[in-house]
Image: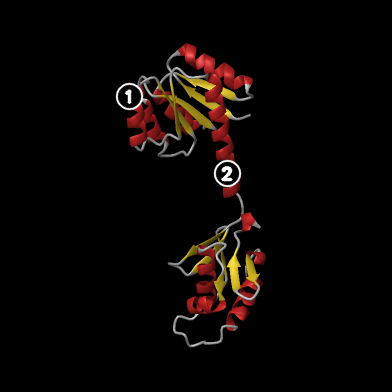
């Protein structure tokens, strides 16, 4: 059950939001000051935060600033001051959304659900296997583990990974692989690709494009 942290010093508004969240199948915790909110997120976490702008101890903007120092939890700011909207939008508050008071509790819950869907989707994507390029050490990493490649293979695969889904011709890849142009046979790229596929996890990420060359499809999109 997703956990919604409601940070609101008006007890009636906090209770109303908690009731609507509970009706939507969401677990809630209510706090009335900013300092407690920061401590709660740090110690216990939350799936999303409904954060009032005007709070005792720390205001909402300062809470956002501190929370963003250690957490990417979605934050929806609640404000009764229309004149603060430009300030909220203009500052790098760290908030993901804002709602003006008086608000519809149903709208707030709808926004909460939308942000929860987006954050859960981002988490799912981040948990998928992935390749990364470290040009400083000339390594290709797969889920943090290095793939054993020659310098030529590294240059070729790095360019493909850094331009996912882009189709490169054999001659373009040859230019990347052999900077001194000593190898003028573009079919040599086929040999390099064969060797790379043999060494790399998920070799199907390297796709042949008939009559053109090759492209790299990220693992999560296969």
Residue position marked by numbered label 1 in the rendering: 83
Residue position marked by numbered label 2 in the rendering: 123
* Badge 2 density bin: few <14, some 14–19, many ≥20, Cα 10 Å: few
Q: Position of residue 205 (x, y in %)?
A: 63, 64
Q: Position of residue 181 (x, y in %)?
A: 47, 85
Residue at (43% x, 19% y) in the render: 101
Q: Quadrant of the N terminus?
A: top right
Q: SS for tag 1?
A: helix
Q: SS for tag 2?
A: helix
Q: Identify which residue, 48 or 176, lies in the foreground.
A: 176
Look at the picture and state if 90 lies above or below 77: below
Q: CA distance from mark 1 to mark 2?
A: 35 Å
Q: Position of residue 121 (x, y in %)?
A: 59, 42
Q: Earlier in the sequence, mark 1 or mark 2?
A: 1
Kindly tell me whether residue 83 is visible in this rendering.
yes
Look at the picture and state if 127 lies above or below 68: below
Kindly tell me whether residue 46 is visible in this rendering.
no
Residue at (54% x, 33% y) in the render: 47
Q: Tell us which disc is closer to us: 1 or 2.
A: 1
Query: Is there a contact, CB below 8 Å, between mark 1 and mark 2?
Result: no
């Amino acid at each position: 059950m997703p956990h919604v942290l409601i940070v609101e010093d008006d007890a009636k508004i906090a209770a109303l939001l908690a009731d609507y969240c509970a009706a939507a199948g969401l677990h809630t915790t209510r706090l009335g000051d900013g300092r407690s909110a920061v401590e709660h997120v740090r110690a216990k976490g939350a799936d999303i935060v409904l954060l009032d702008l005007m709070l005792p101890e720390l205001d909402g903007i300062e809470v956002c600033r501190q929370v963003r120092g250690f957490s990417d939890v979605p934050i929806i700011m609640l404000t009764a001051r229309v004149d603060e909207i430009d300030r909220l939008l203009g500052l790098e508050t760290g908030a993901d959304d804002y709602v003006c008071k008086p608000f519809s509790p149903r709208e707030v819950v709808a926004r909460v659900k939308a942000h929860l869907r987006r954050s859960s989707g981002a988490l799912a994507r981040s948990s998928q296997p992935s390749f990364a390029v470290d040009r400083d050490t000339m390594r290709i990493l797969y889920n943090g583990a290095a793939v054993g490649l020659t310098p030529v293979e590294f240059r070729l695969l790095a360019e493909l990974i850094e331009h996912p889904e882009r189709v490169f011709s054999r001659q373009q890849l040859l230019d990347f692989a052999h900077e001194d142009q000593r190898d003028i046979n573009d079919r040599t790229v086929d040999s390099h690709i064969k060797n790379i596929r043999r060494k790399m996890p998920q070799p199907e990420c390297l796709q042949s494009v008939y009559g053109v060359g090759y492209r790299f499809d990220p693992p999560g999109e296969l």
